């Protein structure tokens, strides 16, 4: 990654942090699929756990 550098064309994501984040999400979902992990359920449960552990005004909203 090229820290602090942005593409000249805002529509181009090649080489950006957004591209790297997508790679991580893609592979995480692929692994979840292989192991039959219900990500909707995991997100809900983990969000509830985090809300009780960490005081934050940001709340997970199902169905959004």
Image (cartoon, rainbow, N blue to C red):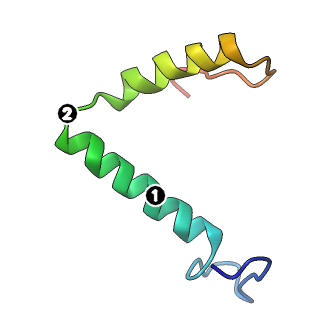
Q: Which mark is residue 13?
A: none
In the image, residue 59 sits, relative to residue 24, either above or below, namely above
On the image, the x and y values in percent for residue 39 come to 36, 31
| Relative to 21, residue 61 above or below | above
Q: Which residue is mark 2?
A: 36
Which residue is at the far bottom?
Answer: 8
Identify the image quadrant of the C terminus: top right
The correct choice, above or below, for 42 with respect to 34 in the image is: above
Q: Nearer the viewer, residue 31 or 62?
A: 31
Secondary structure found at label 1: helix
Q: Quadrant of the N terminus?
A: bottom right
Q: Residue placed at 60% from the left, 82% from the top?
A: 12
Q: Residues within 10 Å of mark 2 (few under 14, many from 20)?
A: few
Going 60% across and 21% down the picture, which residue do you hit?
Answer: 61
Residue at 54% in and 68% down: 20
Residue 5, position as x, y percentages in the image = 77, 83
Residue 62 spot, x, y in % from top left: 53, 20
Q: Residue at x 29, y 27 (%)?
A: 38
CB contact under 8 Å: marks 2 and 1: no
Is disc 2 placed on a helix, strand or loop? loop
Image spot of residue 49 (x, y percent): 57, 14
Mark linked to residue 24: 1
Number of marks present in the image shown: 2
Q: CA distance from mark 2 to mark 1?
A: 18 Å
Q: Which residue, as the protein is rendered here, is positioned at the far top?
A: 52
In the rendered structure, the answer to whether residue 63 lies left or right of residue 10 reads left
């Amino acid at each position: 990654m090229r820290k602090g550098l942005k593409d000249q064309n805002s529509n181009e994501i090649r080489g950006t942090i957004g591209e790297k984040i997508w790679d991580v999400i893609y592979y995480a979902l692929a692994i979840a699929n292989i192991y039959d992990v219900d990500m909707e359920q995991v997100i809900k449960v983990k969000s509830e756990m985090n809300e009780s552990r960490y005081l934050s005004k940001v709340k997970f909203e199902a169905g959004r």
